[in-house]
Structures are given as C-alpha cells and as structure tokens.
Amino acid sequence: MSHVLLRPVIAVSLLTALTGCWFSERVEEFGGPTMGSTYTVKYVRSKDSPSLESLKRETEAILAEVDQQMSTYRDDSAIEQFNQAPAGTCQAMPAGVLQLVEAGRVLHEQSAGAFDLTLEPLLNLWGFGPKARAEKVPTAEQLTAARTRVGMQHLRSEGEQLCKDVDVQVDFNSIAAGYAVDKIVQRFNELGVTRYMVEATGELKAAGKKPDGQPWRIGLEAPQDGQRVAQRVLDVDGYGISTSGDYRNYFEEEGRRYSHTLDPLTGAPITHKLAAVTVVDKSTLRADGLSTVLMVMGTERGLAFAERMGIAAFFVTREGDAFVTQTTQAFEQLFAAGDEQ
C-alpha cells in the first residue's frame, strides 16, 4: 500500500513519580527524520534504563537498516536493486525483505487480492509512486500496459533469493513502517525498556504505564482536511496501531477526486465513501497491512471481512457533509471504555 501515513494525536502526560531516594522515573522523548517523514519515541526511563543517547542510536540504526533494505526512494536499496533488474531475475535478499514479502503474500491471499506489493508501476502512473509522473488520469492503454507488470503471482521466494517472472516492482510502503516499529520495540524489550510509545511515519506501538500509572493515550484523527482533531482516544498497552485514509494524499481532475489508495483488482483509485480506517493488532506490521486492505475494500466489504477475521478496526465513512463511525466487535472488546470525542 502506498498509503497515507496519518499521524495519531498522542496524549502523553509528563508527570513523574518518585521511585527512589535519588532517582525519579520520568518520560524521556526523542525523534527525528525517517523514511521521508519523522519518528517519535517516548519511554519511561528507570534507574537501570539505557541512556537516551544509547536508545536513540539503537533506534536510528534500525530505521537506517530498514531504509537501506526497503526504500523505493533510493537507488541503492536492496529492493530497488531488485526492482531495476530485468524479468527472470533471482537476487539474494536480506532476511527482513523476505519476511515482508511473505507477510505481503499472506495478506494478499487472506484478502482475495485486495493487498498487493507489486503496485509500483500503477502508483507511478497515477502520480503517487516514487518515480511518479504528474498527477493525471492515465489513458486506458497506459493502464493496460502497467497492469501487465503487476501481480503477486509474478513474485516468489527461493531460499534466500527473491525472484520475478515479469518486470514487477515491489513497494513496501504499506508495511515497512509497521515492521520498523516492531523491530524497535523488540530491541527495547531486549534492553529492558518495557514502557514506551514508539511511532514511525504514523504507525505506532505502545506498552506499559507512565510513571503516574496512566496508560499511553492515542487519539484517532477525524478526517478533516487541514485539521488535526482527535475523534476517539484509546488507552493502549501492548498493541500496534495503523490508520489509512484518503483525505490527505489525492488529486482532483475535472471535479473528481482521485485517492492515492489503489484497488489492485481494478488498477484504479478507490471510489467508495470510506474516509479512514484504523486497525489495532499485537503486530504493528500486520496492523499496517490490514489498514490498507480495509481501506481498499471500503466500509461494507471491509467491515464484513474484519468481523470474519476477528480484526479490531474503527471505520470512518463519509455521509454527505458528516462522518459516521463503525467498529468491529474485536475493537469494542479492546476499548469498551473508549471516549468518543
């Protein structure tokens, strides 16, 4: 999915609690640029925690590795080297790349094709990809030509190699950030940091309590152009969150709005009324991918799919000038006490 990466509204209290005679637990924060966007880390620093500088180095090393392996915006990345290779190529790939390909294949099969890692030629054609032309509606002939280079069936793994039958181009923008967040929190747990909120390009995971005993509170944005308003606030502990929406990355032509979210089955932007959808899952990678799946499907089909699969999801649908929200049973079971804003 080249999906818009929506920045959750993060409510974090910086109150501290005294835990010893000389050391007070406190929330530390750092961040910086990553993947064409930004990342933010907030964590509870205890007496035995690594220093902020050390954690920042660990975090940025992981983000740099993900970028080096999976970015389609740099010619020297592992996946871009593969993308530039001709049809029939088999190329050795890092374990992380192969993991994402497999995760993409699972999502593709579960969603009956609503998720596809090989959409880059179409994204570029519509003006949303890393090598995009001007934002403009393509001709039928251009669409037909681009679709011959799209399809998960043309991509396969053979041991440590990734192979392609036709000139496909892989785009991990739908799951790379979620994967990066999971890698970072895995490293934090190894270092004994178990209370944190880690966010990268809008995908996030939070765990534990703050020093005042309060949970990390995550606000889901209302889909209003040019504004950031929390529509519902969630208390999060041990879950990843991803939101996909169509209200920030789009273009208009002859009075019609074209979303950056493409339906792999048509090769064209989605046309339904779903404005945004949030998925909550133990795996941030999976939440990242599933939010794209549901955004492609739309409210009716997506809600039925999410209920069937036990997915915790929050849908925001346009109804005239207003928005209607719907949630799955799994979502309400997690956040029964959530406050509507």
Image (tube, rainbow, N blue to C red):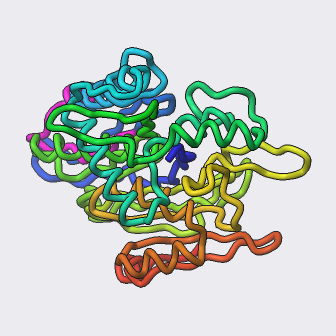
Q: Kindly identify the residue that appears in the image at 33 percent across and 64 percent down.
A: 281
How many discs appear? Answer: 0
Q: Is residue 45 left or right of residue 172?
A: left
Q: Quadrant of residue 160?
A: top left
Q: Is residue 262 left or right of residue 93?
A: right
Q: Quadrant of residue 286?
A: bottom left
Provide residue 308's location: percent of width, then percent of height: 39, 81
Quadrant for the C terminus, please: bottom right
Query: Of all residues shown, which one is farthest toward the top?
Result: 76
Provide residue 13's location: percent of width, then percent of height: 40, 54
Residue 52 shown in magenta: yes
Residue 251 appears anywhere in the view: yes
Q: Kindly identify the residue that appears in the image at 38 percent across and 15 percent down.
A: 76
Q: Kindly identify the residue that appears in the image at 54 percent across and 69 percent down.
A: 232
Residue 26 appears anywhere in the view: no
* 143 or 289: nearer the viewer: 143
Q: Tell me where the magenta segment starts and ends, as one range.
A: 40-56
Provide residue 224's location: percent of width, then percent of height: 71, 57
- In the displayed structure, would residue 303 be above or below residue 81? below
* 81 or 260: nearer the viewer: 81
Q: Is residue 183 left or right of residue 293?
A: left
* 87 or 340: nearer the viewer: 87
Provide residue 280's location: percent of width, then percent of height: 38, 65
Residue 139 shown in magenta: no
Q: Kindly identify the residue that appears in the image at 77 percent across and 72 percent down.
A: 322
